[in-house]
Image (cartoon, rainbow, N blue to C red):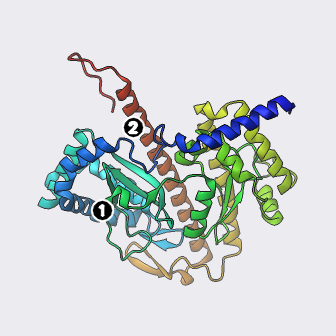
């Protein structure tokens, strides 16, 4: 790269770094846990929700309890843990969908009053949106921002003895946006127990997806092609990705295993971890210079590529587990199928393989459902932005966006 262009490139990076803290105040990222219009949300919360907090909690609890049998039947086990452990996203999405259609007459009196208050709040313009982020420096959590309230309808998905529903003032919940990929890696290690490495294997995808996770059972996954994480790095012209990609390469053996698994899949693979690190950093600069962070079509391409990569990695892990079942990695001592408990140790190799296949498909379905929810959230944000940008017109026809 010629010296003048390199100098301009470095100036851009420095400028983005200095302005990073201001970027967060230009608008909300998809599912970002932050209140955009604090004074307006506070007034609507005070008027419609504060007088009915007990009834609102009763409403959410009634909906959650009604959904539990369906969700437990749909996915009794996730990553070796029985329902509801680890299923905060699935529960949150199901509750949000059910709240759209549930009727007051189907709920107890106090819960019906809570539903009435919630809908009045929403009709008045109050925000009810799914959010995701760092909860108390310990977990990734899916919850809701409802006005100035933090609402968690899956409070028992880490510790099952906790109440199912928790409502707190948002500023007391200690619920924070993921700042960068270093922050994400810190929580992933603490919460999931994963090892997290820079993506020096797939340089072209690295500016959008700069991390690779390896779980304790050995599952390898390219992270994280979600709308929030993609938006977080794209709004900063891939600077967050470049920062984490500067870290030391992953172990040689892991690098070689991923390359073997992805060989023939149409990806340009580096010669070594160090070579991959160089290429990944070059891709950040190249894609920044081409302004790919400003091209929405690139997002869909990245999501599709990441899905195919993760599907191939999951198939490899699945095949490995069937060939070499772990001696002590028991998801649970038994599993209930058609109201009959089966001891996992007593299942045949074929039955175990089918069970693992079901769990794999369930994981893929959950991931796709999460992307649909993210897209719906993004659409809602665009609709709200459009409404805010429209001139105020007295009278005339009304155009509804639904």
Q: Which sits earlier in the primary sequence, circle 2 or circle 1?
A: 1
Query: Residue at point 39% right, 42% down?
Result: 36
Label total for image: 2
Q: Nearer the viewer, residue 263 or 195?
A: 195
State the quadrant of the N terminus. top right
Kindly give the residue lying farthest to the top in the view shown: 396
Kindly give the residue lying farthest to the left in the view shown: 109
Kindly give the residue lying farthest to the front in the view shown: 18
Residue 332 in view (yes/no): yes
Query: Residue at point 79% right, 34% down?
Result: 7
Q: Nearer the viewer, residue 369 or 92?
A: 92
- Residue 219: image location, x then y, percent: 65, 65
Q: Nearer the viewer, residue 43 or 386?
A: 43
Query: Residue at point 37% right, 57% down?
Result: 171
Residue 267 in view (yes/no): no
Label 2 close to label 1 by CB (< 8 Å): no
**Which image quadrant for residue 272?**
bottom right
Circle number at residue 380: 2
Q: Which residue position is annotated with label 1? A: 64
State the quadrant of the C terminus. top left
Graded by Cα atoms within 10 Å as few (under 14), some (14 to 19) or many (20 or more), the crowding at tag 1 reads many
Marks 2 and 1 sit apart, C-alpha to C-alpha, by: 24 Å
Q: Secondary structure at mark 1?
A: helix
In this rendering, the answer to whether 207 lies above or below 55 is above
In this rendering, the answer to whether 367 lies above or below 123 is below
């Amino acid at each position: 790269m010629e010296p003048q262009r390199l100098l301009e490139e470095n100036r851009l990076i420095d400028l983005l770094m200095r302005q990073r803290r201001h970027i967060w105040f230009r608008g909300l990222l998809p599912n970002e846990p932050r209140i955009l219009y604090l004074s307006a949300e506070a007034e609507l919360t005070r008027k419609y929700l504060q007088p009915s907090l007990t009834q609102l909690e009763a409403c959410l609890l009634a909906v959650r309890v009604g959904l539990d049998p369906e969700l437990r039947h749909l996915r009794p086990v996730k990553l070796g843990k029985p329902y509801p452990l680890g299923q905060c996203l699935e529960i949150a999405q199901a509750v949000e969908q059910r709240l759209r259609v549930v009727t007051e007459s189907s709920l107890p009196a106090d819960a019906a009053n809570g539903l009435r208050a919630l809908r009045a709040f929403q009709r008045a313009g109050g925000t009810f949106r799914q959010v995701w982020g760092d909860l108390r420096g310990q977990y990734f959590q899916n919850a809701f921002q409802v006005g100035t309230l933090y609402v968690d309808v899956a409070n028992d998905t880490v510790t099952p003895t906790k109440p199912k529903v928790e409502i707190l003032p948002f500023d007391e919940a200690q619920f924070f946006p993921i700042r960068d990929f270093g922050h994400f890696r810190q929580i992933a290690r603490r919460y999931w127990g994963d090892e997290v490495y820079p993506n020096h294997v797939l340089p072209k995808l690295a500016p959008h997806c700069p991390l690779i996770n390896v779980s304790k059972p050995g599952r390898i996954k390219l992270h994280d092609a979600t709308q929030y994480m993609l938006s977080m790095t794209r709004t900063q012209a891939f600077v967050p990705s470049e920062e984490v990609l500067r870290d030391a390469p992953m172990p040689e053996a892991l690098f070689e295993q991923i390359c073997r698994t992805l060989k023939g899949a149409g990806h340009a693979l580096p010669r070594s971890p160090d070579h991959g690190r160089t290429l990944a950093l070059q891709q950040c600069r190249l894609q920044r210079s081409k302004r790919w962070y400003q091209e929405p079509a690139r997002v869909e391409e990245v999501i599709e590529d990441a899905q195919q990569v993760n599907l191939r990695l999951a198939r490899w892990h699945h095949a490995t587990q069937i060939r070499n079942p772990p001696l002590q990695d028991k998801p649970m001592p038994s599993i209930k199928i058609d109201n009959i408990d089966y001891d996992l140790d007593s299942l045949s190799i074929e039955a175990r393989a089918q069970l693992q296949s079901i769990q794999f498909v369930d994981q893929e379905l959950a991931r796709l459902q999460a992307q649909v929810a993210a897209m719906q959230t993004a659409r809602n944000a665009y609709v709200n932005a459009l409404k805010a940008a429209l001139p105020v017109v007295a009278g005339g026809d009304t155009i509804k966006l639904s």
